[in-house]
Every structure is written in C-alpha cells, then in structure tokens.
Amino acid sequence: MQNKEEELVPTSISNLLMQVKTAQNQNGLRNNQDYGKYHQYCKNRVSRLRKALRHTHHPKNFNADQGRITGDLVAKDTRYLLVQLFSVEAAWAYAMQMKQVQVNANSKKETQHISKGEDMA
C-alpha cells in the first residue's frame, strides 16, 4: 500500500498546476475564499512532505544549509519540488488573508463613518 503523498508525485508542469488547483478547490478557495484555511492546509502539507522525506528542521541541530532544497535533491525525488511549491502557496495564502483582513477593517471603518454621518475626507 503506497503512502498518499507518494502517489501524488507530479511528473510535469501541467500535473503540478493541476495539483495546486485541486488543492485550492478542495481546501477553502472554491466559493468562499477562505485563505486562512488554505494557508493552514499548505503549512500542514509542507510539514507532512518534509516528514516523509526525512528533511525536517530540528531546533537543536539546525544548520542553515541543512534545510535548503537544491536541484540535486529535486533530481533524486520530485517531492522536494512539492515542498517548495506548497511553501510558496502558503505564503501567498497568508498574504491574501492579510489583505482581506485589511479590506474588511477599512470597510467597517467606512460604514461606521457613514452611519454616524461623518465626512471621510
């Protein structure tokens, strides 16, 4: 029986894009634009991949070069590419979540000013 992570290893760019789109649709970005949920999914996915690859960061023995993913590692196992891809996706989802929070905070302030009859300028 194969691990779930091993059977989803991409072999081409189109497979990578399809896998990202599927992950987005299944984890919060289909209808409701829940970037927080997708960010959490990506972080967990990176953690699971690192654990499966035995490429984790241990706080006591941390070395800056130890955590880097190079082309040699990707050539050995393409799951290292997924680690990088989902790290980028997690960062993007976090940025979009913060943007959404900022927009919502500004719109609440605007509605407060409008309801009090104050001038925004």
Image (spheres, rainbow, N blue to C red):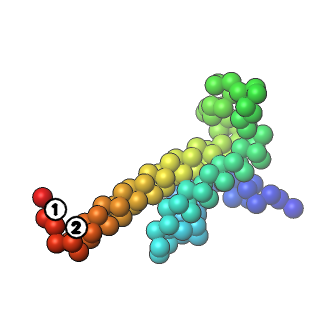
Q: Which residue is mark 2?
A: 113
Quick check: 3 left or right of 92? right
- Above or below, 69 against 80 in this view is above
Does residue 89 appear in the picture of this structure? yes
Q: Position of residue 107 (x, y in %)?
A: 30, 66
Residue at the spot 62% in from the left edge and 31% down from the top edge: 68
The earlier-in-sequence mark between 1 and 2 is 2
For the residues labelled 1 and 2, the Cα–Cα distance comes to: 7 Å
Kind of residue at badge 1:
Met
Does residue 78 appear in the picture of this structure? no
Question: Residue 52, labelled with which disc?
Answer: none
Q: Position of residue 24 (x, y in %)?
A: 54, 64
Which residue is more in the foreground, 113 or 11? 113
Q: Secondary structure at mark 1?
A: loop
Residue 65, picture quadrant: top right
Q: Which residue is mark 1?
A: 120
Query: Are discs 1 and 2 less than 8 Å apart at CB?
Result: yes
Q: Residues within 10 Å of mark 2 (few under 14, many from 20)?
A: few
Q: Residues within 10 Å of mark 1 (few under 14, many from 20)?
A: few
Residue at the spot 76% in from the left edge and 26% down from the top edge: 61
Image quadrant where one finds the C terminus: bottom left
Residue at the spot 60% in from the left edge and 57% down from the top edge: 40
Which residue is more in the foreground, 12 or 27? 27
Q: Position of residue 14 (x, y in %)?
A: 53, 58
Which residue is more in the foreground, 106 or 18? 106
Residue at the far front: name it.
116
Residue at the spot 66% in from the left edge and 54% down from the top edge: 44
Which residue is more in the foreground, 72 or 101? 101
Image quadrant where one finds the N terminus: bottom right
